[in-house]
Amino acid sequence: MTETNPRENIPSPLKVELKDTASVFEGHLKIKKYQLRHELFQGGWSQTLYREVMSQGSTAVAVLPFDPYRQEIVLIEQFRIGVWAAQSNNPWILECVAGLSEDEENAEDVAIRETLEESGCSILRLHPIATYYTTPGCSDQKVQLFCGEIDSKDVCGVHGVKDEGEDIRAKAWPINKAFDMLNEGTICNSTTMIALQWLMININSLTTKWTSTLKN
C-alpha cells in the first residue's frame, strides 16, 4: 500500500461557480451578496456559500511622502469612522496619503493629486511599493502603494477637500521617529505599517537613488 506524503504539493483549485448575486446596500460603500461554490484542494466542490462583499467601486492608491535629503516622511492625521466605531480612545489616526481613482485615472495621477490635496506636497518622483488586497475575506478593495519623493521643508497646516468632508492635518516626521512610532504601536493601520516597514528595509538604496540622479 502506498502511503500519501502529506508534504506533497496539492494542486490549487481553479474554478468558481457563481449561482446568484444581489445588491444589498448602496451608500458610501456598496454591499453585494454572492451565492457560489468553488473547487476544493482535495477534489470536488464546496457546499454552496453565501457571502457579503463590501466595495468602494474603484482601486485605492496610497502614498508615503518621503524627503530623502531631510530624511523625513509626511503623515496625515484625520478622523476615521471605523476606529471610532471600534470604541478606540482616539479615532484620529496617523496615515499615509490615500484616495480612490476617478474616471479611470492611472495610479500615478491619483498619487500626485491626493498627495497635493491631503498634505500640500508636490510629488517629484514615485516608487512602487506593493499592490495588495486590504481585507480579502469581506472586501474587494485593492491598494496600490507608493513611496513618493517630496520636499518636506514647509509641510504644515490643515488640508483636504471640504466638500468631501475632509479635515486633514499634515506633519513631517524625522524618519527615525516614524520608525519608533511603528515599533511602539502608534501606527495602527495596515497601509502605513506596510509602507514604513518597506522604507525601513529600503531607505538606504532609495536615498542613494533619489539624491544621486536627476528628476525626470
Image (tube, rainbow, N blue to C red):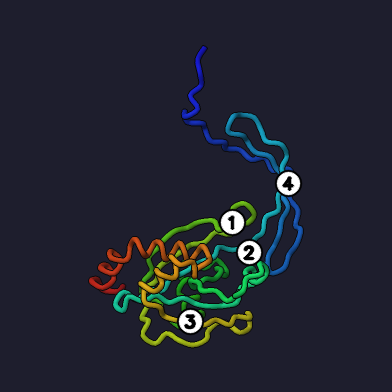
Q: Secondary structure at mark 4?
A: strand
Alpha carbon separation for disc pair 2 and 4: 20 Å
Horizontal arrangement in the rendering, residue 166 relative to residue 147 (left or right): right
Name the spot of residue 167 as percent of width and height, x first.
58, 82
Which residue sits at x=59%, y=29%? 42
Alpha carbon separation for disc pair 4 and 1: 17 Å
Task: Give the vertical position of 214 relative to 205 (above or below).
Answer: below
* The label number, if any, that marks residue 135 in the structure image: 1
Read off the residue under disc 4.
50
Which residue sits at x=45%, y=61%? 194
- Nearer to us: label 4 or label 3: 3
Which badge, 1 or 2, is on the more N-terminal residue?
A: 2
Cβ atoms under marks 2 and 4 closer than 8 Å: no
Alpha carbon separation for disc pair 1 and 2: 13 Å
Kind of residue sitting beneath label 3: Ala
Which residue sits at x=41%, y=62%? 197
